[in-house]
Amino acid sequence: MRDPLNKKIVSIQPSGIRKFFDIVTEMEDAISLGVGEPDFDTPWHIRDEGIYSLEKGKTHYTSNAGLKELKVEINKFLTRRYGISYDVDSEIMVTVGGSEAIDIAMRAMLDPGDEVLIPQPSYVSYLPCAVLANGTPVVIELKAEHEFRLTPQELEDAITPKTKLLVLPFPNNPTGAVMEKGDLEKIAEIVKKHDIFVLSDEIYSELTYLENHISIASLPGMWERTIVINGFSKSHAMTGWRLGYACGPAVIIKEMLKIHQYAIMCAPTTSQYAAVEALRNGDDDVAAMREEYDGRRRYLLHRFREMGLSCFEPFGAFYAFPCIREFGMTSEEFSTELLKSQKLAVVPGTAFGDSGEGFIRISYAYSLENLKKAMDRMEAFITELRKKREA
Amino acid sequence: MREKLLTFIEKNSRIDLKELAIVLGVDEAAVINELEKMEAEHIICGYHTIIDWDKVGLEKVTAMIEVRVTPQRGMGFDKVAERIYNYPEVNSVYLISGGFDFMVTIEGKTLREVSQFVSDKLSPLDSVLSTKTNFILKKYKDHGTVIAEPAKDERIQMIP
């Protein structure tokens, strides 16, 4: 029989955390800090609007780009929070989570051979999406000594005449790193100088703990070369609703919309009605969740300091990315041992790229009580490791 | 800090003070100081426990009683309220707008005990015009806490 498969998709590796997932789901009384989604349920008034829309029979397709009233609210939100605005009819489209937006943006923008700069450690889907879009992914290895921010030098060094697109994943999963205005301004200069585009994945934009998030699209001359991706999963705890959006120049959105139209038709209707409510009346929920995450973040950092685990201060998302190099193990060895001996699951940094070696991702989308138990286990584990090394 | 502190301990009053300080990002001494001040000012009026007594198997009856009264000259409702809330059987007293004046909750061991309290103590008060006793059949949510079993974490345990 002929090989039924496409060689490109066969060459793509499945996500590296599968192994841990299998162990942890079978382990009794394991604590997992491996979850990359909010622990909060969607606020009730938002769920209620979803239910109400079903009761009213809003069970049909919406237009391809999404409900007009949702796009209006998205635009208002982006304007009031980040000072960027878009034409509701041609520059905003609603997608099935931020994930779809990443995929179709790359497919709409890349030709074979175009290079896509992907700073790592970062979310697992940029690289495969670039490959599937016939682009050539070029990894930029971010450094702990720069708090995992993208530096102008690192960017400049990675650019070639073939470079077309820069993925800008901040606030960052898995490191919790943010880019402040000063950092972004330097990046913007280089982007403009080399005439490349930016895919700015801002899905964690509402979860920052230092200052408000800055979108690179709000900097001079950047709006016209940036696709902003955002959504409701992290900000409004709506992961299961699968709802995100992309905004940018009409010429790009128009082509993205074609792919979306043929592959997806439209984002889930119920979710879109719920999202209208989220944007109209949800700011207080977001603020309350942010406050809660921030307290947990401070607690984790305190515990790391107490147990002498080195970690730069993460100012965004809900992850901390401590360094485990002192133990002379790889991230995967460390995580595996930790799971086996203390029944505590974390994600090895290498799941997010080779430059995550020597680090582990700890999610604080967990109750304080849970984090406390988890940190007690972590402390017991590294105390034991240190003892062994001394002996 | 006051508002943050209160918002936090309203939901979790048993948190260790050292941890509370870490979570709020302030000094432990400052937290203790602020708590003591608010206790003295009676902003913090107590630390209580929400109990599902049904599970303990102990018989307990709670009633919410709508009370209509004539306010007393020169003292309004406060004096009447005081006469009511001084009974230890009385759990809470609220002055209410609308069709009646006070909402009084009373706890007792049996229906009879509660009814007796209403007929022997509450109704005969001079200023009380009428009472309407509503017995609570089931408590679903109290002080912002759902009484039913807390939901389990059903998230997939490893998500990138």
Image (cartoon, rainbow, N blue to C red):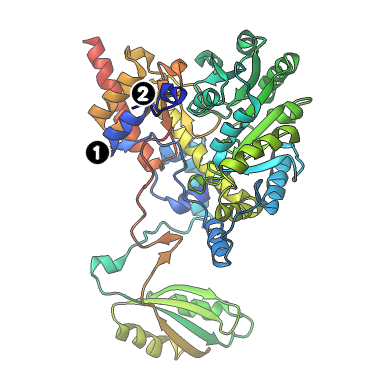
- Which residue, given by chain and number where applicable, does mark 1 sit on? A26
- Chain under numbered label 2: A
Where is residue A10, by image quadrant?
A: top left
Mark 1 packing: few (<14 Cα in 10 Å), some, or many (20+)?
A: few
Q: Nearer the viewer, residue B15 or B153?
A: B153
The secondary element bearing badge 1 is classed as: helix
- Which residue, given by chain and number where applicable, does mark 2 sit on? A307
Report x, y in % for residue A208: 58, 34
Q: CB of mark 1 within 8 Å of CB of mark 2? A: no
Q: Name the kind of residue labelled 2 in the image.
A: Met
Residue A212 visible within the image: no
Q: Name the kind of residue labelled 1 in the image.
A: Glu
Mark 2 packing: few (<14 Cα in 10 Å), some, or many (20+)?
A: some
> Does mark 2 fall on the same chain as mark 1?
yes
Point out the frontmost of discs 1 and 2. Answer: 1
Q: Nearer the viewer, residue A285 or A139?
A: A139
Q: Nearer the viewer, residue A75 or A264?
A: A264
Q: Earlier in the sequence, mark 1 or mark 2?
A: 1
The secondary element bearing badge 2 is classed as: helix
Q: Residue furthest left?
A: A391
Residue B142 visible within the image: yes
Q: Residue at x 40, y 45 (%)?
A: B15
